[in-house]
Amino acid sequence: PDRFDFDVSERVSPRNSDQCQVRKPNARERQIQRLVALMQMTYVGAPMLYYGTEAGMWGCDDPCDRMPMVWQDLTYPDQAKDPLGRPRKADSVGFNQELFDYYRRVIQLRTDNSVLSHGKFEIVAHDDQAMFFAFRRRTNDAAVLVAINRGENDFLWQLPSSLGGIPRQIFSTADDSTSVSLGKEGEHWTVKIPPLCAVVFDEPMAEE
């Protein structure tokens, strides 16, 4: 009776909470998922994806977090049950090709840029109120800048003054790559990043 179970306790498990929702993620939540995937592929350490994440599977907690895998060539009935017996709207279940293609692209970003696996890590900017965070991965031969806007408004970021030339956008979590706009104000490059969006720049190396 004195044992505290960190798996099923009220501190960590949502399964007995009225706030626990087993519904399908909405469009805004999928944008956040894209940010998470980009962070995984650009931050320090080896990325790990739980099976089905790349296919669009979702789940709140046991038993909803260990559903059978969804495959491209199969069809599935709608999900309409709630483990707590609450009424809910039925959600369609199926392979999410758009999200799958995004995961392929963001994984390829890491594969094509060895600096994301081996480069040193440095925080270059942050704004807690605006929910903005930017960092650099750098080796002797290459450097990339990763900027993440978790806020609900556009964020105008002034890029580091140490840039050795024009920064080149190599990835964006936005569906429309042109939604991230790069400009110059005086001697400084600035970039406008839409809400819930992240962008990666190939940073020109300054001459010694």
Image (spheres, rainbow, N blue to C red):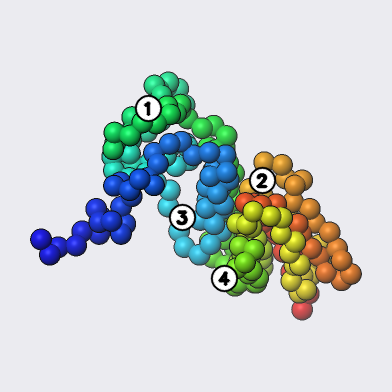
With 198 as the anchor, is 103 left or right in this view?
A: left
Mark 4 and mark 2 in contact (Cβ < 8 Å)?
Answer: no
Spatial distance from mark 4 to mark 3, Cα to Cα?
15 Å
Going by the numbered disc 3, the residue's amino acid type is Pro
45 to 57, vertically: above or below: below
Name the mark nearer the viewer: 2 or 4. Answer: 2
Q: Position of residue 152 (x, y in %)?
A: 64, 53
Name the mark nearer the viewer: 2 or 3. Answer: 2
Which quadrant holds the N terminus?
bottom left
Residue where numbered disc 3 is placed: 47
Q: Is residue 71 visible?
A: no
Residue where numbered disc 2 is placed: 174
119 to 26, vertically: above or below: below
Name the mark nearer the viewer: 2 or 1. Answer: 1
Q: Which circle's residue, 2 or 4, is located before the other in the chain? A: 4
- Mark 4 lies on a secondary structure that is strand
- Mark 2 lies on a secondary structure that is loop
Residue where numbered disc 1 is placed: 80
Mark 3 and mark 2 in contact (Cβ < 8 Å)?
Answer: no
Name the mark nearer the viewer: 1 or 3. Answer: 1
Residue where numbered disc 4 is placed: 121
Which quadrant holds the C terminus?
bottom right
Mark 1 and mark 2 in contact (Cβ < 8 Å)?
Answer: no
Q: Residues within 10 Å of mark 4 (few under 14, many from 20)?
A: some
Frontmost residue, 60 versus 114: 60
Spatial distance from mark 2 to mark 3, Cα to Cα?
21 Å
- The quadrant where residue 176 appears: top right
Q: Which circle's residue, 4 or 1, is located before the other in the chain? A: 1
Spatial distance from mark 2 to mark 1, Cα to Cα?
31 Å
Q: Is residue 105 visible?
A: yes
Going by the numbered disc 1, the residue's amino acid type is Ala
